[in-house]
Amino acid sequence: MSELSSQATRMEAIGGTYDRWLLGAALALAAIGVIMVASASVALAGDPTYYLKRHLVHLVLGVGMAIAAMKVELRKVEEFNKWLLIGCFVLLLLVMVPGLGHSVNGARRWVRLPGLGSFQMVEAVKVLYIVWLGSYLVRFADEVNATWLAMIKPVGVVIALVAILLMQPDFGSSMLLLGITAGMLVLGGAQIKRMLLPILLLLPPLAALVILEPYRMRRVTSFMDPWADQLGSGYQLTNALMAIGRGEWTGVGLGASIQKLNYLPEAHTDFIFSVLAEETGFLGVCVVIALLALLIGRALWLGMQCVDQRRHFSGYVAYGVALWLAMQAFISIGVNLGMLPTKGLTLPLISSGGSSVMMTCVAVGLLLRVSWEYQRAVRRQSWRVAGGLDDAPAVPADEYEPAITPAPLSATAVAARMQGGNAVRGTSRLQSRVEPSFGELR
């Protein structure tokens, strides 16, 4: 017993390492963001460095929050899954409180925080919701694959959140939450053919929201032919396209953009990609896209490795953050290139924006924590194998398993599993997990 105790002590001393590729990509994007915010905002205020200083303050705060997230055990975070969901609704409803929430350009999405100015609550909700949904997929792993009810529950939750967002209104973040939910459900085991019905049912009301709201419809029509009303509804997009066209292969040089000089609206936030393209050209655009692809791809790889290692909660968190960053970057770049209708979504880690910058940093901190715990588990397993300790109870029981006991299988789920013939693999010591099924392909 004393030998096993000493072995367990040595096991506890083994830590992990943070993913260098992930950290390097995030730092590089943040550095490019600082440079581009400084360049794009130089003509927007009396003080040329006003927006740069604000961006740096928010970035420093975000780094501090990311470091805090990197120090917290994910299994401890998972224990608060219900409170995280409640927090999502509370944060979105705070903007409706008189005297606390305030409007900008007709949208009531912000809350005034002492010392921080305005904070967009939906940015924090994205992080909390991803963590909650990851926990839900762990607790109802087999149910999500086998029954309609377990799959529909998170869809109902996100519809309730979207309803609040549309009251603000925030159509872009609403679509983002819906996309994250669909992606995580599929990666968590829901069958694609079952996902089609909720998607088809949601399409008509979403289309009606666009058609019945004049300003949204103008964005669609201007996106299809921005040059038809160059000085009206197509003003933003035409100036963005002119900026991108001027950049050509190598750009006009840092600080030499013309479109940022009060021609291109929101040059330091929503349309910073156009300024980047104008000043650094096609080569600079390729560098930024490559760094985003590295960050997102590494997050997806981490998620896959964690799921293979039976650390499903960590894997789902990594998947969720990767989906969020990928969708937001795709929409932001697509809007700047005229591929998508105009939406108010920032380019992750590049655009100026207090709440967006800080919560993206928190998301990166969560990814780094996932990588640290994954590497710790790999090192401990290697140490056990090298020492011939495969049967030694050296690793704590909750090291590889979720802290929350998975929900028991219903009779329907058991029957579906018996009939489905899916490949199974354990997600806990008590029950086996049905792997994701893509239609009839096994």
Image (cartoon, helix red, strand yellow):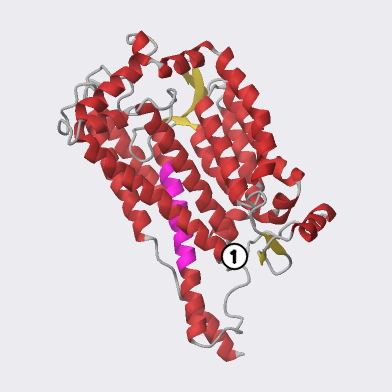
Quarter of the rendering occupied by the C terminus = bottom right
Q: Name the side, left or right, on which 293 lies relative to 169.
A: left
Where is residue 304? Give x, y as percent: 51, 59
Residue 288 in magenta stretch: no
Task: Residue at 36% x, 41% y: name it.
Answer: 349
Task: Residue at 37% x, 55% y: name it.
Answer: 22
Quarter of the rendering occupied by the N terminus = bottom right
Q: Name the side, left or right, on which 251 lies relative to 336.
A: left
Amino acid tagged 1? Arg
Where is residue 247? Give x, y as percent: 20, 30
- Number of numbered discs present? 1
Q: Main secondary structure of the magenta part?
A: helix
Q: Name the side, left or right, on which 287 lies relative to 317.
A: left
Where is residue 72? Give x, y as percent: 50, 57
Query: Where does the magenta region start and end?
Result: 360-375
- Give SS at disc 1: loop
**Is residue 298 visible from the viewing direction of this image?**
yes
Where is residue 73? Give x, y as percent: 53, 60
Rendering quarter of residue 244: top left
Measured along the vertical axis of the image, is residue 357 above or below residue 204? below
**Is residue 48 visible from the viewing direction of this image?**
no
Measured along the vertical axis of the image, is residue 80 above or below residue 280? below
Residue 372 in magenta stretch: yes
User: Which of 211/45 is in front?
Assistant: 211
Q: Name the side, left or right, on which 377 lies relative to 332.
A: right
Mark 1 crowdedness (10 Å alpha carbons): few <14, some 14-19, many ≥20: some
**Residue highlighted by disc 1:** 310
Task: Residue at 58% x, 83% y: name it.
Answer: 390
Task: Residue at 50% x, 28% y: name it.
Answer: 172
